[in-house]
Structures are given as C-alpha cells and as structure tokens.
Amino acid sequence: VAVEVDVVRTNLQLGFEGGKSGFFAHVGTLVCPSIMPTKILSLWSGPRNVSTALMYSFAEREDTTVIDEPLYGHYLSLTHAPQPHWEELMEQLETDGETVVREVILKPPDVPLFFIKNMAHHLIDLDARFLDELTNVFLIRDPEQMLPSLVNQIAEPTPRDVALEQQAQLFRDLTERGSEPLVIDSKALLLDPEKVLRRLCERVEIPFDPAMLSWEPGPRPEDGPWAPYWYHNLHKSTGFAPYAEKTNPFPEALVPLLEASRPHYEFLLERAL
C-alpha cells in the first residue's frame, strides 16, 4: 500500500501548549509505503561545525523532513547562556525540553526520514535514554579550526559552548548501551562531500540522493529564528564550501580552551567515518 503525499516548504506550528513554534520544512512530492516507520536521524553537533549545511543537504531529499535545533529554547531557559537577541528568541522557542522530546523528536511527521539537527550541549537535565530510539550521528570539528570562528558569536566561550566533551560522553553512553553511533569529521565532509554523504547514507541504510550536494542560496524555511545572527555566510552558499585551513595565528586567550577540548575531539576523530 502506498500513499502519495504532497508537501511544501513551510514552518509548522507544532501545537505545543503555549503556542511555541518549531521549525520544520520539507519539499517535493513523494510516494512512500504507509506501513514503514519513519527513521529518525539525529545529528549531535557542536557550533561552527557545518551542521546547518548538513541540514540543508538533507532538506534537499524528497523523502525527508528536517528540523533545526528543537532543544535550543530548553537550553537557553536553563542556562541563560549569552546569545544574540536572547529575549527575542525566548519568546519564540519552546522551552520545555520534555515536551520537545515527547512531541517533536519522538513524534516524527509521516515521512520516510526525519532529520533533526541538534547541538550536543543543548541536551541537559533530560533523561538521554530517548536517544536509544534514534539513529545518532555526531558531527565534529578540530577545535583549533573551530574556536576562532566561535568567538565571532560568543566572545568568551566555555567548554560547554564548544560541546566536544558532551559529544564524547554521549558517544560513550550510547555505545555502553549497545548502540552504534556514527561520527563525521567536518573536514572530511568538506574535502569530499559526496564520498562522506554516500558513506553516511550507506551506514544509516538510506539511498544516497545527489540532490544533497547543492541547494539554492538565501534564507530557508527550516531555519530557526536565530538564523540572522548565525547563518549569514551560509545563506550565500549553494553547497558545501571547499575546505580552507585557517592560517592566522591562533588566539592566545583560547589556548586553555583548545587544550581542554582536544582530547575529546581526538577520541571521536578516531571513530569517524
């Protein structure tokens, strides 16, 4: 039995109590078996890791719905972490993490693939065992390359902002419970997007779609409301940017944070695709 579903790119009100928004988007017309369960693919990233580009890539698939950082409001409400336009964001985001897990992450739309872009450090004060019901992928980046970019948004970043420690611990927890999470290094992804995406698709048992390699420039419906403060360079892109090594001297003030982050990065890098 197959069901034809017409879908368009749109932001959807998710029906949370309090009327907060989620940021779903989808495109295309698809035919899918109605009896097949939706595969929930959760990306656990840190900041400045090309995670939004990867979300855009999956948004180009006709079988996929994507959502942008659904736990962001939960994280901000608990930490009061300094972010651009904090109060404006808090008016728009769902701040109850348990509601997000129950009503968004574990209640996917009726499509073959549901791609969730998550930040690892947003997963706080929640029972993380719900990850056992997801297909989990960790996206990492060399902190020596990432930290000089992060300070453009967060002037004095902390280990929590970097998220590598949280990623490493989540990976350990999942493997101890018998899961087999995947790891992608952003450098490898940028050096050969098609190779890495083909490998990822094979490992999560979905077909590779060449449409994942490019997209139209500009803001997109799946963007969260923080996009104007974080995504301005990405909105100029039409695909994964070629990898470029940072050559400026590394900021001396960030050296302690780099040294604290590197062991977690190297642990995950050893396990990358």
Image (tube, grey):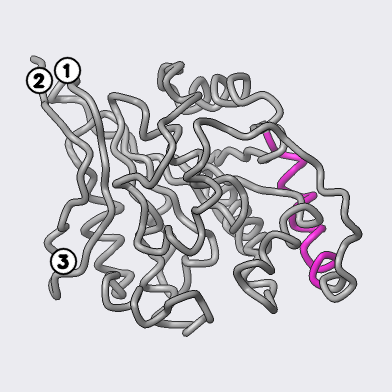
Residue 227 part of the magenta-drawn span: no
Residue 70 at x, y percent in the picture: 35, 59
Q: Earlier in the sequence, mark 1 or mark 2?
A: 2
User: Which disc is residue 4 wearing?
Assistant: 2
At a point 60% along the width and 51% down the height, the residue shown is 171
Near-viewer residue (218 or 24): 218
Q: Amino acid at mark 3?
A: Phe
Residue 22 at x, y percent in the picture: 25, 58
Q: Do the numbered discs 2 and 3 sit on residues whose CB atoms are within 8 Å?
A: no
Mark 1, residue position: 31
Q: Main secondary structure of the magenta part?
A: helix
Left or right: residue 145 versus residue 125 is right
Residue 190 at x, y percent in the picture: 66, 33
Q: Do the numbered discs 1 and 2 sit on residues whose CB atoms are within 8 Å?
A: yes
Mark 3, residue position: 16
The span picked out in magenta is 257-272
